[in-house]
Amino acid sequence: MRGLNRSLTIVIVLLLITTSFTMVLIIDGRNRQDPSEIVWRNEYDQYTIRSTWDHFIDDNKNILYTPASESAMSRAGTMMAIDLENDEILWTHTYHHYFIPSVSGTEDLLISGGRHGEVIAVDAETGEKVWHQEFHTKNENENHVYSTHVHDDTVFTGSNEGRVVAAEVGSGEELWRHTYHTDGVISNRYGDIIYSACNDGYLIATDAETGEKLRSYSYHEDRVSELYIEEGIIYSASRDGMTAYDIEKEEELWSHKHHLEGYLSIHVEEDIVYSGGVEGVVMALEAENGEKIWDHDYHQSSYVHSIQVLDGTIYSMGHNDGILAVEHEGGLITGISRSLSAFGGFLSTYVLSPFQEYWLISLLILAGVISGIILLLQNDKETKSSKPRRKNF
C-alpha cells in the first residue's frame, strides 16, 4: 500500500507541474492565439472579390487595396480601395483590362501588375493613374506580372517570362532588367540585394542597384510562390514546403510541410509566420522552428493566395471566396500545445486539432483530481485502521 501511495503521489506531482506550466503559458499567450471567428468578409452588391492572387493593406491608413470583378462570372480586372474602419469603397479603377496578379504600394502610390505584362501606378488616395509601363512582353496569351515589390524609391517586378525589372517608383522609369530566370518570378529585397525565385525552385541574389547576378541557391524542387524577408531570414513558400534561410549565416534554419498540398502565401508578424496553403487552410507557425501553433479552414475554397496581419486581425484571400478577416482571441490552445510539447514532443509527433488538445489537457487535470481523491481516501482508511484499540480492564 505504501508503494501505491508513493506512485500516486508522484503522478499527482507531475500532473500539478504540467497544469501549472500550462496555466503560466496560457497567461503568457500574448499574440500566439487561436483564431476565434470571422469578423469581416468582403460582400458588396456590385463587386465580387474572387479569382484574385494578391491584396495590399496600408497599415497607417487602414485601407485595403484589392482586385475585384464586376460580376461573379468575370475575372478580376477592377482595382478597389476599401476603408476597413467604415467598410466602404473609396474608389475603383479599371485600367487593367483583365486579371491583376500582384499589388504593392507606398503611402502615396498603389502599384499593380497585370496579366498582359503591364505595370500601373495610381494615386493611393484618388485612384487616378500616375504612370503605365509595359516592362514585360505584352501578348494575347498569359504573361502575368507575378510580383510588384516596393522598397524605398524602387519597385521590382517579375513576370512569367523570367524577367525582373527595377524601376523608379515615382516616375516608372526603368533602371535595369535581368532574365536569369526561366519562368514566373517573384522577388523581395534585403539591404542591397534582390532575391528572386521562380518555377524551377532556384533562388537568385542580384545587386539591387545594377541587377548583376551575385549567387544562386537551390533548396526547392518545385515552384516558389512567395518570398518573405524578415530580420535577415528568407521564408520561401513552395508546393514542396516552406523553408527558412538565414542570409548572414548562409544556412537553412528549418523546413516544414504542414500544408499537405503546398504553401502559397506568407506573412511574418513579430515571431509568428502566417501561411496560406493550396488546400485553403491558414496556419500560424513559430518563426524560430516552424512548428505549427494553430490552423483554420474558414475559407470555402482552395488556394489562399495572399495573407496579411493588421492590429491582430488576419486578412487572407481565398481563390473563390475573396478576402476574410479573422480575429485573435484567447491563447489557450497555444499554451496547451507548448506545455505538452515539453513531454517528448508529443504534439509534434501526433498532430492534434485544437479541440483534441483541449480535451487532452482536461482529461489530464481530471485524472489528477481523481488520483488526489483516491489518495486522500486511502490515507484516511489507513489512519483509521492504524489507530490502537482501547482495551477494557
Image: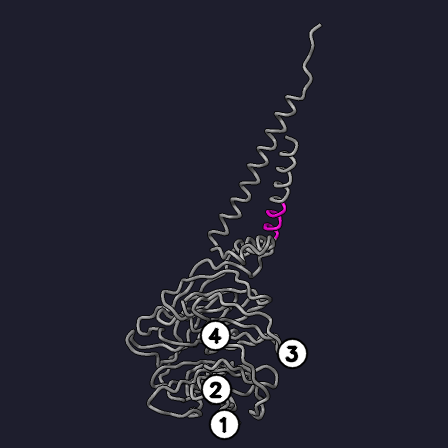
The residue at which mark 3 appears reads as 248
> What's drawn in magenta, residue-wise?
17-24
Q: Is residue 83 above or below residue 284?
A: below
Crowding at dot 4, Cα within 10 Å, few <14 / some 14-19 / many 20+, comes out as many
Q: Where is residue 205, by image quadrant?
A: bottom right
- Left or right side of 336 for 86: left
Q: Is residue 23 magenta?
A: yes
- Where residue 344 sits: x, y (%)? 59, 54
Which residue does the image show at 57% across and 69% down from the upper left? 254
Compare residues 125 and 121 and report the one nearer the observer: 121
The residue at which mark 4 appears reads as 238
- Which of the two marks, 1 or 4, is nearer to us in this view? 4
Distance of label 2 from label 3 (alpha carbons): 25 Å
Could you tell me the amino acid type at mark 2? Thr
Q: Is residue 221 above or below residue 327?
A: below
The residue at which mark 2 appears reads as 157
Mark 1 / mark 2, whichever is N-terminal: 2
Can residue 27 be seen here? The reply is no
Q: Secondary structure at mark 3?
A: loop
Mark 4 / mark 2, whichever is N-terminal: 2
Could you tell me the amino acid type at mark 3? Glu
Which residue does the image show at 69% across and 17% down from the upper left? 388
Mark 2 / mark 3, whichever is N-terminal: 2
Q: Secondary structure at mark 4?
A: strand
- What's the magenta bit mostly, secondary-structure-wise? helix
- Which of the two marks, 1 or 3, is nearer to us in this view? 3
